[in-house]
Amino acid sequence: MTVHIGAAPGEIAQTVLMPGDPYRAKWAAETFLKDAKLVNEVRGMLGFTGTWNGNPVTIQGSGMGMPSLSIYANELISSYDVQTLVRIGSCGGMQPHVGIRDVIVAMSASTITSPSSGIFRELNFAPTADWSLLQAAVKAAEARGTKTHVGGIYSSDVFYAERPDLDEQMVRHGILGVEMEAAELYTLAARHGRRALAVLTVSDHLQTGEALPSEDREKTFGDMVEIALEAAFS
């Protein structure tokens, strides 16, 4: 048990999927895991442990933004010895060829700042995914016929950004999408020698303004969850 996670020793699997929304964690656990059990509800940040194809899996909400994810990822690693952490969540598309409902597998995650920025000081650390997870996720997505893009994303520290000039430069440099957590997850995984990946569903588009209705999101996010699970246990 930690300050933010109420699970007892042995109740957290070594493989954890991390959606931002705790209710998405509940939906994913009930939909994809067998014998899912609620193991955390501290501050309403729900976590469930069950099995997928016989493999123990925990699905733990991480909240919105890098500071929130950093709390949960740090505690999962330091107190529960989690080895594999896969972020599953939504993102905004940034390239014309990236469509709504497409899946992005994030090879790298650029950011202006994160909770780890103070450690590096003047260094611009380049957070990247674990190669074995990334390769397995791409293979799983191809096998499912899911339209998937692999490349760099941007982890923003604000939701309501007002920097069209920055968006323009990211599009110019091939950034596929924007979200708010992956850069810190990748940094923490590198620091502690763990595996990390972000598998994201495009729920809206910064250029076209198109967005998924809220009632369509859970159904659409199913591909992302299955890709993440298949990658984790390949």
Image (cartoon, helix red, strand yellow):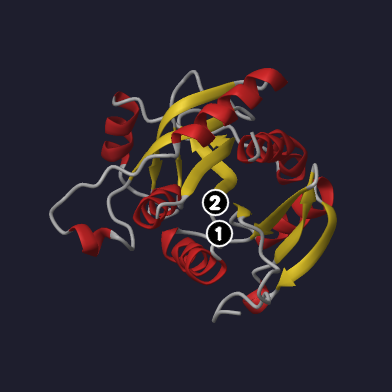
The amino acid sitting under disc 2 is Leu
Question: Measured from the top left, where is residue 99 in percent x and y?
Answer: 57, 24
Give the labeled residue for mark 2: 85
Question: Measured from the top left, where is residue 115 in percent x and y?
Answer: 33, 63
Q: Which mark is residue 110?
A: none
Q: Where the C terminus falls, by quadrant? A: top right
- Point out the residue furthest to the left here: 122
Between the C-alphas of marks 2 and 1, the distance is 7 Å
Give the labeled residue for mark 1: 82
Pointer 1 local density, CA inside 10 Å: few below 14, some 14–19, many at least 20: many
At horizontal 24% and vertical 47% (from top left) the residue drawn is 125
Q: Secondary structure at mark 2?
A: strand
Relative to 164, say whether 37 is above or below: below
Relative to 188, say whether 171 is above or below: above
Pointer 2 local density, CA inside 10 Å: few below 14, some 14–19, many at least 20: many
The amino acid sitting under disc 1 is Val
Q: Is residue 178 left or right of residue 167?
A: right
Visible in this render: residue 145?
no
